[in-house]
Each structure stands twice: as C-alpha cells, then as structure tokens.
Image (cartoon, grey):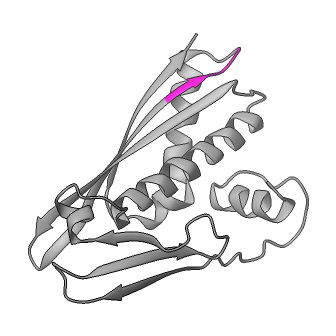
Amino acid sequence: MNFAAASILRTLTDAKPPFEEKAMSIVKKASAHWEGDLKTGLGSISTETGVLREAPYGFKARFEGGKGTNPEELIGAAHAGCFSMAFSMILGDAGLKADSIDTQAEVTLDQVEGGFAITAVHLILKAKIPGASQAQFDELSKKAKEGCPVSKVLNATITLDATLVN
C-alpha cells in the first residue's frame, strides 16, 4: 500500500496518521455498459485498473444464479478486501501482525417497499495473529468493522463473526 492510501485509510478509520501531512482524496473509477431490457438485457462491468474488463452481468446472474457477476458480489468483495486491510492496519497500530486474515462477506439483497435494497452484510473473519488474546482480537476486529471505509458507505446492518485461529 502506498503512503497516500495508508494515510487516507488511517484518517478514515480514526487511527493516528504516521506523519503530519494533509490527507488527499483518492478517486477510483469503474464503469458499466448495458444493452436491452432488464430481464433479457446484458451488461459488462469494468474497472480503471483493468482487473475487471468487460465482466458480464445481467438479470440471470443477479437474481437466478446464472453465469456472470453482479453488483452485490462486487460490493461483498470490496467490503471483504477493505475490512481486511483496515484490520491489518489496526493490528499494526496495536503492535500485532497477522500471519493470515481471511474475510468473507455475505451481502443480503431484499425486496423492500419501492424496490430492492442491500439490507445486511455479514462479515466472516478467520485470522491467525501471533500474540493476540481473544479479548484483543474481538476489540480490534470490531474497530475494523466500524472504521472500514466500505462499512461506512453502506446503509445496511453489518455483522461480524470473528475467529482467532491458533
């Protein structure tokens, strides 16, 4: 992680920045292309880094288990990745270093009045952290859940199951 990204992440999670510098905004871009109606149309999603390049998505992938990705899956991946990085930073601030951090995000899409909404994200964390007590692990993982920038942007109930692996 470069200095600017670490500085922004620390600011967003209310941790102390390593140096006295102004935080700068980081702008990331992604795009979507769609053709057709909702049920039979098809689209593609791309990221500016090229990690996703015209990844297919559509109604069947989103609602019927068909091939392709969907926005909820991508939000889950973003949340799991963001949480893992935030947790790693918070561990470092506590003088700890993880051997491994594995996070899964289960994103719930419900039909609500007026359409659909992401109503919940359940994070499942398994981490191996030498020297961490269970109490310390619980406290720091909760802090990461609350401070993760993706957690902050979601208007959903976010829960966490955290397992410290020996």
Where is residue 42? Give x, y as percent: 30, 79
Rendered position, 9 above or below 101 = below
Residue 38 occupies which quadrant of the picture?
bottom left
Apparent side of residue 35 relative to residue 144 in the rendered image (left or right): left
Rendered position, 165 above or below 97 = above
Instruction: Assign the C terminus to one quadrant of the image.
Output: top right
In percent of the image, x 16 and y 59: which residue is there?
64
Instruction: Assign the N terminus to one quadrant of the image.
Output: bottom right
Apparent side of residue 86 relative to residue 45 in the rendered image (left or right): right
Residue 65 occupies which quadrant of the picture?
bottom left
In percent of the image, x 24 and y 89: which residue is there?
36
* Nearest to the observer: residue 21 or residue 148: 148
Instruction: Look at the image and say whether residue 73 sits in the magenta stretch.
Output: no
Rendered position, 67 above or below 97 = below
Where is residue 136? Give x, y as percent: 59, 24
Instruction: Look at the image and say whether residue 129 sits in the magenta stretch.
Output: yes
Where is residue 16? Give x, y as percent: 77, 52
* Nearest to the observer: residue 96 or residue 2: 2
Apparent side of residue 43 relative to residue 146 in the rendered image (left or right): left
Apparent side of residue 59 relative to residue 98 in the rendered image (left or right): left
Q: Which residues are magenta?
A: 126-130
Magenta stretch secondary structure, dominant: strand
Q: How many marks?
A: 0
Where is residue 35? Give x, y as percent: 31, 89
* Nearest to the observer: residue 61 or residue 76: 61
Residue 92 occupies which quadrant of the picture?
top right
In percent of the image, x 14 and y 76: which residue is there?
115
